[in-house]
């Protein structure tokens, strides 16, 4: 299982504006070429269920997730409920900083193939990081990638 932490700086945009843009999942396909479709259902003030199709290398990755929103803290947490990989969950956090805002994306993913994890998961992580930067750039404009950390957790969903 891999963990990812990706920190991006969004110049000249306050965290509240960036957060509002990030929570509008239905607009992702029109604003980012990495996202093929998003269908949002069961929406209320603090939760939604969203189904995603994103470009993943030469194919399409599909999943459904439950999303939780904390508008006061500018955070979104998500947990996959079904999809192409056994484990995919994480969070988004927006914070005001000097000169704009920072967006921190964290995720855990497990492809569910322990014998191939060392070969396949680094590829999946790279695609996740690239797609996440593409999504945020499409949503808010230019971003600076400040930090990327990748970790390995022992244990597997398989």
Image (cartoon, rainbow, N blue to C red):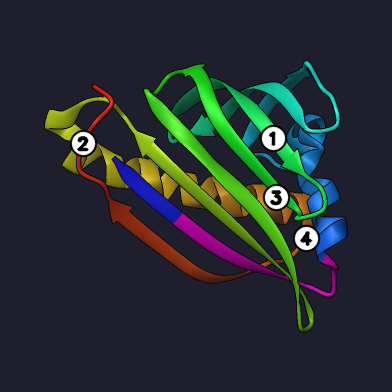
Write down the quadrant of residue 39 in the picture.
Answer: top right
Write down the quadrant of residue 78 in the picture.
Answer: top right
Residue 68: mark = 1
* Label 4 sits on residue: 141
Tell whether position 107 is magenta.
no
* 10 left or right of 124 in image: right
* Label 2 sits on residue: 155
Label 3 or label 4, whichever lies nearer to me, is 3
Q: Secondary structure at mark 2?
A: loop
- Disc 4 packing (10 Å; few <14; some 14–19; many ≥20): few
Q: Earlier in the sequence, mark 4 or mark 2?
A: 4
- Disc 1 packing (10 Å; few <14; some 14–19; many ≥20): some
Report x, y in % for residue 137: 70, 56
Q: Quadrant of the C terminus?
A: top left
Report x, y in % for residue 23: 78, 41
Q: Earlier in the sequence, mark 3 or mark 1?
A: 1
Rendered residue at 66%/47% (across/down): 135
* Label 3 sits on residue: 75
Report x, y in % for residue 80: 52, 25
The part of the chain drawn in magenta is 5-14
């Amino acid at each position: 299982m891999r963990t990812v932490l990706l920190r991006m700086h969004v110049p000249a945009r306050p965290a509240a504006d960036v957060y509002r843009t990030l929570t509008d999942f239905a607009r992702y396909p029109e604003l980012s070429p990495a996202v093929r479709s998003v269908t949002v259902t069961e929406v209320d003030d603090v939760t939604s269920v969203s189904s995603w199709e994103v470009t993943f290398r030469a194919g399409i990755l599909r999943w459904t997730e439950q999303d939780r929103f904390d508008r006061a803290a500018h955070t979104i947490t998500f947990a996959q409920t079904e999809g192409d990989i056994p484990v995919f969950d994480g969070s988004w956090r927006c914070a005001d900083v000097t000169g704009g805002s920072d967006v921190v994306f964290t995720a855990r993913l497990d492809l569910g193939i322990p014998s191939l994890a060392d070969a396949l998961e680094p590829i999946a992580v790279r695609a996740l990081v690239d797609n996440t930067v593409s999504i945020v750039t499409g949503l808010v404009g230019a971003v600076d990638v400040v930090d990327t950390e990748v970790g390995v957790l022992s244990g597997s969903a398989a």
